[in-house]
Amino acid sequence: MKNLFTLLSLLMTGLMITSSCSNDDDYTATLPIYSDVVFTLNGEQLAAGNIPAGSKVNVTLVQDRKGTNIYRYEYSWSCEGVTELSPVKSSNTNADPTNSFVAPTPGQYTLTINVTYNYSGNGGPTLTDGYAISGGSVTYSAAGALYGKATITKNFTVR
């Protein structure tokens, strides 16, 4: 009787161990996929070649796919020759990040957005190869086991 009880206990333990592992969720971080950088003025979208000098323009980094298992995004925005651009913005959400700037003089400009991702999952994602967006590019790099980086550039013309 004692042997039967031991055997049943071992079988039940084995059944519990194998069944508890079968429904594990995947907590690997996935990076956002960016589709464009969009400029707007007074709610109207502007072409990258039709930005008026001296106007405060809103800029949005549009995500085609949101990231998952990332608990913090830090965006470092830079564009030589513009004013009123907030250099660093942090977020705990995966909403499309926004900023604004004034380009005082006509000419060619390049907006650069460097993003640092802090993973909250079980590890970093498989990196996506860089790709082109309209008038710019997106590149990803592995920075460490707990965070990664992306660089987005967008060329635009101020008239």
Image (cartoon, helix red, strand yellow):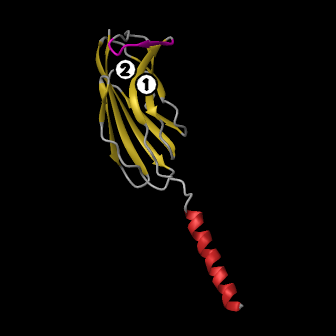
In the rendered image, the residue lying farthest to the left is 108
Coordinates of residue 20 in the picture (x, y in percent):
59, 64
What is the three-letter code of the residue carrying label 2? Val
Q: How far apart are the alpha carbons under marks 1 and 2?
A: 7 Å
> In this picture, is 43 found above or below 121?
above
Residue drawn at the location 35% of the way across and 32% of the way down? 152
| Magenta region, residue range | 43-49
Q: Is mark 1 on a helix, strand or loop?
A: loop
Name the residue tied to disc 1.
85
> In this picture, is 148 found above or below 78?
below
Circle 1/circle 2 CB separation < 8 Å: yes
Coordinates of residue 114 in the picture (x, y in percent):
38, 36
Name the residue tied to disc 2.
82
Q: Nearer the viewer, residue 49 or 124?
A: 124
Q: What element carries label 2?
A: loop
Could you say which disc has been placed on residue 37 in the image?
none
Residue 84 on the magenta span: no
Q: In this view, does 45 lie to the left or right of 13?
A: left
Q: How crowded is mark 1: few (under 14 residues within 10 Å), some or many (20 or more)?
A: some
What is the three-letter code of the residue carrying label 1? Leu
Residue drawn at the location 34% of the way across and 36% of the way down? 151
